[in-house]
Amino acid sequence: MAAFPEVQKIRYEGSRAKSPLAFQQYNADELVEGKAMKDHFRFSVAYWHTFRGAGSDPFGPGTMLRPWEGPVDSVENATNRARVAFEFMEKLGVPFYCFHDRDVAPEGAMLAETNKNLDAVVKVLKEEQQRTGIKLLWGTANLFSNPRYMHGAATSPNADAFAFAAAQVKKMLEVTKELGGAGYTFWGGREGYQNLWNTDMKREFDHLARFMHMAVDYAREIGFTGQFYFEPKPKEPTKHQYDFDVAACVNFLRAYGLDKNVKMNIEANHATLAGHSMQHELEYAAMQGFLGSVDANYGDLMLGWDTDQFPTDIYLTTQIMLVLLKYGGFTTGGLNFDAKVRRESFEPVDLFHAHVGGMDAFARGLKIAAAIRADGRLAEFLKNRYASWDSGVGAEIEGGKHGFKSLEAYMLKKGDAAANQSGRQEMLENLINSLVQ
Ligand code: XUL
Ligand code: CO
């Protein structure tokens, strides 16, 4: 029996569409800058939010109406849920999904039983992937929910917690390979500390690096060729997350020799929690050669925690798409909707409204970004702003022809620096506004 009988396959009906369950902007095969929209975005549904999010918050239990969920979290229930997930994704028309090991199958009493449960559900996921053509964007392991990870997983003071996590990631690498996953994401969850009195930070960082090296080595051993990603996530749940932002993660990867194997998975809400814009985080990762994948969502700036909302802000999607276009777009990565419907949006159809809105917002952002690039005035302004570096002393400095002594001589002769030019921030903001349509 269909879980969403009232929903047909979502179609593109154009901007005059009246149905709330139609795409107004996302037209999968439409070309933008010579590439189909679906290939620009590589949209993915996040299993943990969309199929496991119950809507609980610190003040109350879950509210979600999910008629397909049985009373107990059995393997049978999990396989049934997996089929529902594929019905949803097929109707939505997304090419990818992502999941954690514990999202898809219940934990058993011991590791062996847990792995057996996972295998049973993975069999169904594989069947459904083959039936629908929907693929796995990346897999990951939940190394944060079980109380054994209260002090972290790879950074736990308890070596057995590290060992258990290693076994979990080993299994998930095998599963990700089995399902043809394009990547694997490290999102530690609790890798950080609350208090330095009880924490040997250096030792914990060393352990985290050793853990990631083990994963890379094992992937090589079993022939998993997908891309590894590291996801920054500041503040929650520990006070000092080691994966605070892109810059901290890139420094870690380089310091421990992981930079050849691991790129970044960057999430909008995590960017703002770190005190950055998403545009900054993406640009920083891309300029360093670490742009991998995107967890698409946004956070309510008035709340200040990870609200994981569906991205409907056109400026945000425009900025994301501008960076992606600038750096040539995704290779293995994609836009994974790491977002959840609000606790008050408890009906199954709300899952469709949320994803349709997110996909449309990105389609609109893409078109605006392409229009900004075609217009050319922004790029022209930027080029001119740095014109002093294109010839004369600027070009000589960039070309390595100067040191402090020669620059002092240059300035002593010239007397003072050339006049500055306006940054024209307001004019540029107006320019962008004139193209946001
Ligand atoms: C949690 C988060 C995760 C990761 C995957 O805040 O963002 O969903 O994206 O483990
Ligand atoms: Co995420």
Image (tube, rainbow, N blue to C red):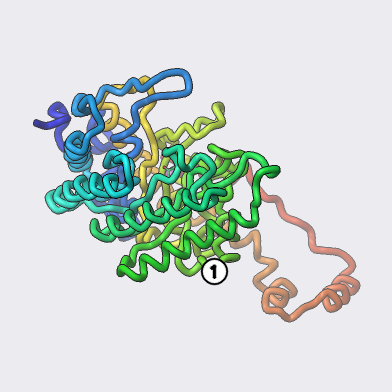
The image shows a total of numbered marks equal to 1
**Quadrant in which ligand 2 is drawn:** top left
Position of residue 208 relative to residue 1, above or below, is below
Local packing at callout 1 (Cα closer than 10 Å; few below 14, some 14-19, many 20+) is: few
Q: Is mark 1 within 8 Å of ligand 1?
A: no
User: Where does residue 219 sit, x and y in percent of width and height?
Assistant: 36, 65
Residue placed furthest toward the bottom: 401
**Residue, x 13% and y 28% (percent of image)?**
5
Q: Quadrant of residue 184?
A: bottom left
187 horizontally vs 192: left or right: left
Q: Give the secondary structure at mark 1.
A: loop
Please name the residue shown 73% across and 81% down the image: 401
Percent across and percent down for residue 307 are: 47, 32
Q: Would you name the residue on which mark 1 appears?
A: 257
Residue under the image location 53 percent in, 49 percent down: 158
Furthest-left residue in this view: 1
**In the rendered structure, which amino acid carries the disc numbered 1?**
Gly
- Quarter the C terminus occupies: top left
Residue 396 against residue 296 in the figure, above or below:
below
Question: How far across and how far down the image is residue 291, in percent?
Answer: 47, 59
Splitting the image into 4 quarters, where does residue 418 fall? bottom right
Q: Is residue 430 visible?
A: no
- Decide if residue 188 is in sight here: yes
Q: In which quarter of the image is residue 344?
A: top left
Tell me the quarter of the image containing the N terminus. top left
